[in-house]
Image (cartoon, coloured by chain):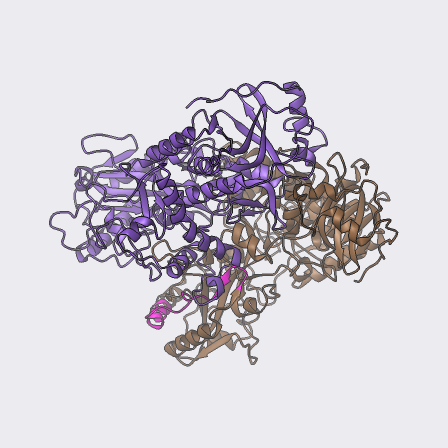
Chain colours: A purple, B brown
Amino acid sequence: MADDVTAQQGSKVSRRSLLAAAGAVTGGTVLARMPRAARAAGRSFDAEADVIVVGGGGAAFAAAIGAAQSGTRVLVLEKAPAIGGTTARSGGAYWIPDNHLMRAKGVKDPKDDAVKLMARLAFPSVYDPEAPYAGLDRFSHGALSAYFDLAPQVVERIERAGVLRSQIAALRPGQIATGGVDWTHPEYHAELPENKAPYGRTLHPVDAEGGGGGSLMSGLATFARKQGVRVLTGQHVVQIATNEKGEVVGVQAQTPQGERLYRARKAVVFGSGGFTQDRSKVMNYLRGPIFGGCAVPTNTGDFIDMASQLGARLGNMRNAFLVQHVLEQALANSSVVDDLWIPPGDSMIMVNRFGDRVASEKTPYHEHTQSHFVWDTTRSEYPNLVQFMVYDSGVANDPYQAYGMPYPRPGTRAPYVIEGATIPELARNVERRLDKLRGRVSINGAIGPDVRLSDGFADNVQRTIDRFNGFAREGHDADFGRGSTPIQVSWGGPRRRGNDKNPSMYPISGSGPYYCILIGGGTLDTNGGPVVDASGRVLHVSGRPIPGLYGAGNCVASLAGQAYWSAGGTLGPAITNGFTAGENAIGEPVKEV
Amino acid sequence: MADDVTAQQGSKVSRRSLLAAAGAVTGGTVLARMPRAARAAGRSFDAEADVIVVGGGGAAFAAAIGAAQSGTRVLVLEKAPAIGGTTARSGGAYWIPDNHLMRAKGVKDPKDDAVKLMARLAFPSVYDPEAPYAGLDRFSHGALSAYFDLAPQVVERIERAGVLRSQIAALRPGQIATGGVDWTHPEYHAELPENKAPYGRTLHPVDAEGGGGGSLMSGLATFARKQGVRVLTGQHVVQIATNEKGEVVGVQAQTPQGERLYRARKAVVFGSGGFTQDRSKVMNYLRGPIFGGCAVPTNTGDFIDMASQLGARLGNMRNAFLVQHVLEQALANSSVVDDLWIPPGDSMIMVNRFGDRVASEKTPYHEHTQSHFVWDTTRSEYPNLVQFMVYDSGVANDPYQAYGMPYPRPGTRAPYVIEGATIPELARNVERRLDKLRGRVSINGAIGPDVRLSDGFADNVQRTIDRFNGFAREGHDADFGRGSTPIQVSWGGPRRRGNDKNPSMYPISGSGPYYCILIGGGTLDTNGGPVVDASGRVLHVSGRPIPGLYGAGNCVASLAGQAYWSAGGTLGPAITNGFTAGENAIGEPVKEV
């Protein structure tokens, strides 16, 4: 996936003067002019296209495909040495309400209910099904409504065009069927009354369930190249170029070959990812502390800085699509390849440093991760910043229990698994591990002085285990409702032999060895950034579009608010709105330079 | 406090063309040029000053006083019809570490510890006393260090100049002395090991303790006018004007008389308050839902929109200085005059809709309010969005218990107090009140369908009361440590006769009547915005200052991060950094237009 195209070298100006003109690195007093200083009046460009797409993941390539219709010349600029972005690391699922495969089976997904479901989860503090726009502002409600309409159309169109073929997500090995037509992969919020279609919205590329993000990207990229889309990698776009009228006419990039100025005759579409890997932005915007994210290392929120200089309105900055990580993996590299998802294992609990459970361990990852963000108003600390996943040898040694992250396969070892013959010994070994990690930092989480087990931790964990074991024997978790929704049992592995109650819980053994994995909060990626309209146009603070500037995916304000609707909740909007943005970019007038 | 000055009317251009030039309201394709389009090349200004200050509260007037030295001409532009801002509504306290009054008494406030205390509270997820910069980034740590040095100097200087005289906060009527020199008003985090000066940092204007914000403002404004500072009210600044070099040369304002363009020869200093009263910004940035704020209605974060267009870096956007409100007052007007502070009353608890306590009711307001932000990962809801303050007639009828918000004075009634002869009756009346409020919205909080008492609420409240009463009899709150820090007992009214244990708790009576007040989360104001350096200069995303642009107070990124250090934690930095910004603005070169 190296450069497809060698950038044109026919510049009339030296690299140095171009750099000075752009004002990107030089000092002085022209700062407020930077965006316009980068405009190209009278200067040569290094390359030209009708539409430039910045980014190389799912949103970017969907935009490229959307734009590369009817002979439009499209240039993709990716910051990393290879395309793929965070999409290539993902499960490759896309959440498409009322999709053609549901309809083919006669499954109904009434719009009014689906939009209410999205609204409730996205903006719960103002959601009101009886109010106009369900309590949301008109703009946010309109975005949800437009998504419901657009998503199935876009997926059908790209299927018909031969970009990819979709299937409805199937069971993973060992998953438990929980009913509903003949799909058994439930929605993460199947239990809500607004959810009239608890099965069928999550799609995957055919033959790519599981590690399907690579397949998805390869499908998108292969098709884009067939359509004549040019792709350049190693292009760190640092500035948006505007003409005298303030219209967007191109971008400036730092490349291994030096600065480059690229002309976009019609528009620039950003699909450049979130800001998970920028510590400062996470600290200033995100509502809780994290140690890592699936987001690739290049996802530093560059678009926020660039678009802000053009007066773009920012939205949804406090939110992210959230997931838990193995703490020690996140401390080693904040761009974490593996996630916790909904962890399997029945004889397993997660506790905080006081030895208390804080949530159902089977809550979907986005919800579960928010337990790390709780601020203890009495102690002035994040008591759940690091959580401790404790399990017994029944889970550790059973291939059907320990079939996925974070457990090492039975018979293998992982350096992040801490062992102890007894709970007190386990606690001592955990404390030792924390001491070894003390002072380590990743993004805006640190193993600071407060991250230590409380006095009496081992005793309290034993009490917590006793209480959990009682719940497991009864089949009912009176504290957190573990296993009470379809998704909480769907991903949990097969029912343990002899457990005819709640399959998500089984009493933790009275004898060791016991195991513990340290868990930290993280993201798939953040999803705040410039606000776009339903056409994908970036809006100025005045509410009007910035001419020639589009965006989609995790680099713009997500319409999902604080929610992650279900599996594919990131890529569904990224692909739908990426494609739409690209397609609308074709209709832009050619801008003068 | 009407206009001191009639704006010069000698404009060579019509209102209409000026408006078009500024691009503020007209449509079209010049959006990205707005900041520069407002520049004044070749145009007449309506008024001119060396330094323009935008805003009319504590930060703004401190800046005006700082700038009005050595004959500098200063013009203050306030959006509201009168000056005062949120400062005039406040208690008027300012938190000044190592201040001259402490030193006069021989009280030590070692810098290293004080900076660590500030760092710990501001950035708890990364704080590490052993790490370089205490685990913070160098910039944030530098800001804290600079504040420690600057704050006492500024206060001493403005005292010597005759602006105001300070005293160390004294007991309120009925407050309980808790030790330490001869001041008895403890720090909110006196218990932390980093806090080597648990008494003395909070100052008030002499003779103005309590409702001292008005006194403070009047002192600042009177002095400023004596120095020749001109003040215009009704000036809604909507645009920052820059010259060809991108230097800030003035502002454009909407006024009752039409659009005005004001020239700032040297600099513009913003002290225009936070964004509490802008629902959209709160929804997009703040980390939890609120129903109101003390912030005056004009605090809609205008500076964020304006400075973003000049490429300003934003910081601390997720945070605010937080406080609780009487819900029904906030629903009536999101700009709330009264706050809950640390509520008095011993036979009083606060519970959520399930009837559970969620925090120590005596936790300082900023901490306590964060309990409203907890997201229930199992139920997908904000379970503590609305809280229920339940108390008995012992509190209601005792003038020493019910001496302040939210209690009506004994013998008087307040419409927001709900009564019941028994707990079940109280619960029924609360449910009825919630039904009456159903559908009401304020900022990003609503009385939506989930805001209702759970089944079994009354029974559970009784269980919660029984448990609380046991704690009260023992003098120890095993759940939330109520009364375990100096501040939690200091503000609680005098010890109840017959209570020789923890004065913050007394068993709730076994017989009615009982009372309930609905409580919602809110702010003093938000405190995120453009990032400024220790000189008060607004920084571009590149890290360099934007020439001629300064800021202080709640309109810029607070150095306090997620903390509210103690009483006066807002005004201390606002005054210190406002004065500093104003003083530094004098040294700016005159900008060409």
Residue A123 position, x and y percent, is 45, 56
Q: Which residue lies at the image location 35% right of the left edge and 37% below the top edge?
A: A162
Out of A43 and A441, give the one closest to the viewer.
A43
Q: Is residue B542 left or right of residue A423?
A: right
Depicted B206 relative to depicted A2: above or below: below
Residue A452 appears in the figure: no
Q: Quadrant of the N terminus of chain A?
A: top left
Tally the marks: 0
Residue B262 appears in the figure: yes
Residue A135 position, x and y percent, is 48, 62
Q: Residue B105 lies in magenta, yes or no?
A: no
Residue A334 sits in which quadrant?
top left
Residue A234 position, x and y percent, is 49, 24
Q: Is residue B67 left or right of residue A293?
A: right
Depicted B574 relative to depicted B524: above or below: above
Depicted B310 relative to depicted B231: above or below: above
Q: Quadrant of the C terminus of chain A?
A: top right
Q: Which residue lies at the image location 80% right of the left edge and 48% below the top edge?
A: B262
Q: Which residue lies at the image location 72% right of the left edge and 32% below the top edge?
A: A29
Q: Residue B445 lies in magenta, yes or no?
A: yes
In the rendered image, the residue lying farthest to the front is: A70
Q: Which residue lies at the image location 35% right of the left edge and 35% below the top edge?
A: A216
In the rendered image, the residue lying farthest to the right is: B10
Residue A425 sits in which quadrant?
top left
Q: Bounds of the magenta span?
A: B442-466
Residue A591 position, x and y percent, is 63, 36
Depicted B431 relative to depicted A592: above or below: below
Out of B530 and A40, give the one closest to the viewer.
A40
Out of A284 and B480, give the one closest to the viewer.
A284
Residue A163 sits in which quadrant?
top left
